[in-house]
Image (cartoon, helix red, strand yellow):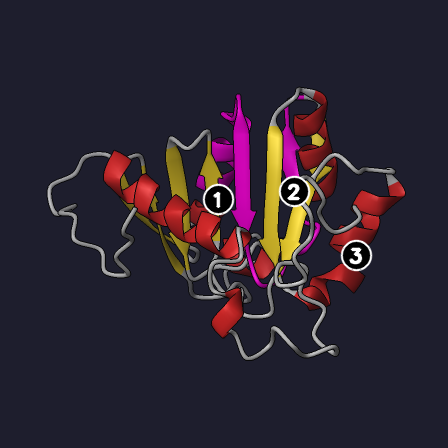
Amino acid sequence: MHFSNKWTGDLEESKSTSILVSHDDSAIHKKTIELLQGASDTVHLASSTFRDFKLYAQHGLLSLSEYLLGLRRKCIQVRILTTPRMLSSQFVRNLLSHGSREIQAKTCARTHLKLICVDNRIVYFGTANLTSSGLGLRSSKRRNFEVGMISSDKACVGFIMEIFDRIWNGVYCNSCRYASRADVNCSIPRHIPAGRTIPF
C-alpha cells in the first residue's frame, strides 16, 4: 500500500478534533489521562522522553508505570516507542522492578514524535513529551508551553498510526545513518525476531 508523507485530510470543521495547550489548567494532562482511562483494547505511546509522573486512577494515585502495568493485567495491549537513552530512565527501572515482560517497547534514536493512541480509535499528538512538565502537571509558573491535538477523525487516526507502525516495523531503518552504529542502542534496526522486544 502506498504511503504519503503528506496529510491531505480536511479537519477545518471537524467536531471530532480538539486543540489543547498545557498552560491552560493542565488541559493536556487531563485529556490524555481520560484517553488512557478509556482504553479497552490497545494503547500506543510514543515520546522521546518519559517520566514516571503520577496520575489519578480509580483506586487512587498511581505512577504512569503502575497504570500501564494495570492495563496489561486487563489484557490491554501496550506498545511504547521511545529513544535508547530511556532504557536507563526511572520510568523503565520502575517497569522492570515489577518484573514486567508484558509491555512491548522498541527504541529508535530518531524518535521525536509524541502521541497516545487508544484502541486505534482516538489519538493525542503534539509537542509535549510524556513528562510532568510537558503535560502541564507543574505549577503555572513552571510548566512548559506546549500545544497538542486530540482527534477521533478516522482518517487522522489512521495516518498517525501508520507513521507509528512504519517506525515500529523498521521501514526506515535501511536508510538510517544510525543503523550500523554499535554505540546507538536502537532495538528496531537490529532485526529483532517477530514477537521479541527490548527486555522489559
Whole-percent x, y for residue 65 in the image: 72, 42
Residue 129 seen: yes
- Look at mark 2 in the image and give the residue it sits on: 194
Q: Nearer the viewer, residue 57 or 153?
A: 153
User: Residue at (87%, 38%) from the top-left corner?
Assistant: 99
What residue is disc 1 on?
A: 116
Secondary structure of the residue carrying tag 3 is helix
**Residue type for callout 2:** Ala
| Front: mark 2 or 1 | 2
Secondary structure state at the residue bearing disc 2: loop
165 left or right of 189 in image: left
Q: Secondary structure at mark 1?
A: strand
Task: Give the labeled residue for mark 3.
Answer: 90
Q: Please, is residue 167 above or below residue 45 in the view?
A: below
Q: Residues within 10 Å of mark 3 (few under 14, many from 20)?
A: some
Q: Residues within 10 Å of mark 2 (few under 14, many from 20)?
A: few
Mark 2 / mark 1, whichever is N-terminal: 1
Check if residue 7 falls in the magenta segment: no
